[in-house]
Amino acid sequence: MTASQIDTPVLGTYYDSRFPNLTILNHPLIQHKLTHMRDKNTSTRTFRDLLREITLLMGYEITRTLPLTTRQIDTPLTVYDAPVIAGKKLAIVPVLRAGVGMSDGLLELIPSARVGHIGVYRDHESHRPVEYLVKLPPDLEERTFILCDPMVATGYSAAHAVDVLKKHGVAGDSIRFLALVAAPEGVKVFHDAHPDVHLFVASLDSHLDENAYIVPGLGDAGDRLFGTK
Ligand code: URA
């Protein structure tokens, strides 16, 4: 990304004028940890730990706008109307398999959240998602969803995961999509399909290569997370 594409740097957050529903969380700790993840010499164990740590930092940012209400409690000194999170209950939905590396971190922040799963794999020739599993919590319309998948490459899997939730009746403004690294091509596909769904990433990388891998990227996130090939 060049400086001219950066519109509004606010407290470690960048927006890109091409994609109004994209927020880039470029907190220095997130960027530092992401650099270690990109390094091909980083071990599986460290990669996993870093993904969890970055997800905690990003989770903190994307929950910043959750509404608050008050609940009356007794402190040792007085009765106090204390702030508590209001509104819809939260659900976390990792896109299998690499999304699991992020949902664990999100659950540490929001331990009472329900967890769904959407399983898609990428057809090697068409690079299109093939769905093999959908498991979602009940009371979908009453929940705010955090979908997570580290890589938004072509954008088809991410857009498909949102399609799944919308087909079950979830409104776009009740969905936040959390990813680590995105390619501009994928963000465009996602934005064209779901302009009403906010996408949060740690980095908007340069481009996709001929195999639809993100460049510079970090390789296959699932393989690096689970130590597979
Ligand atoms: N999925 C990955 O894990 N990495 C990429 O670069 C693209 C898709």
Image (spheres, rainbow, N blue to C red):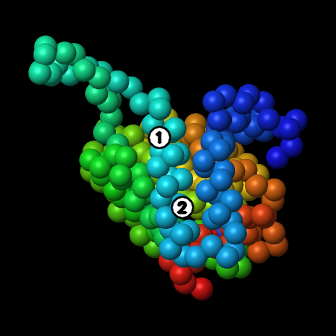
Residue 72 showing in the rendered view: yes
Q: Which of marks 2 and 1 is nearer the N terminus?
A: 2
Q: Which of 126 and 85 is in front in this view?
A: 85
Do residues under tags 2 and 1 come within 8 Å of each other at their CB atoms?
Answer: no
Q: Where on the picture, by quarter, is residue 142?
A: top left
Neighbour tally class for label 1: few under 14, some 14-19, many 20 plus, Cα within 10 Å:
few
Pinpoint residue 132: horizontal percent, then vertical percent.
46, 73
Which residue has dot 1 on it? 60
Under mark 2, the amino acid is Leu
Which residue has dot 2 on it? 50
Image position of 136 (left or right of 152) = left
Q: Which mark is residue 199?
A: none
Image position of 189 (left or right of 62) = right
Pinpoint residue 30: horizontal percent, then vertical percent.
61, 49
Residue at position x 72%, y 39% in the image: 19
Helix, strand or loop for disc 1: helix
In the figure, 214 relative to 90: above or below?
below
From mark 2 to mark 1, how far is it between C-alphas?
Answer: 15 Å
Picture quarter with ligand 1: bottom right
